[in-house]
Amino acid sequence: MPQFKTIRQAAATGLIPEYRLRILVAEGRCPGIYAGNRFLVNDEALAEKLDRESKANLRREERPSEE
């Protein structure tokens, strides 16, 4: 069962700052759902998303530049 947290609770885990989470929600890039006017972050899906993005960034950095 997925674990849902408010933005503030998700930020309190130390995974990502609250301000950045709010930006991701506004951009529609944060996994979660709206419950009324409150956005609930899918904690596990967020961690997986950040892990995938960080691995993709590492692969980009490891590629030799074409100069």
Image (cartoon, grey):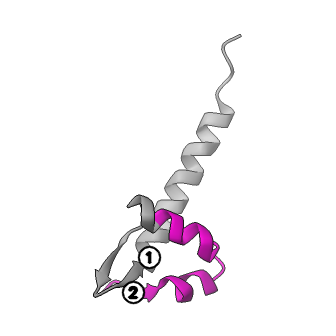
Residue 44 placement (x, y as % from top left): 44, 76
Q: Amino acid at mark 1?
A: Glu
Q: Is residue 16 magenta?
A: yes
- Residue 43 placed where, x, y %? 45, 79
Badge 1 is on which residue? 44
Helix, strand or loop for disc 2: loop
For the C terminus, give its image quadrant: top right
**Residue at horizontal 28 percent and vertical 88 percent from the top:** 36
Q: Cα distance, mark 2 to mark 1?
A: 7 Å
**Residue projecting furthest to the right:** 67
Q: Which tag, 2 or 1, sits closer to the chain's start? A: 2
Residue at point 66%, 79% (across, down): 14
Name the residue type under label 2: Gln
Image quadrant in which you'd find residue 34: bottom left
Q: Are marks 2 and 1 in contact (CB under 8 Å)?
A: yes
Residue numbers of the magenta segment: 1-24
Residue 12: image tag: none
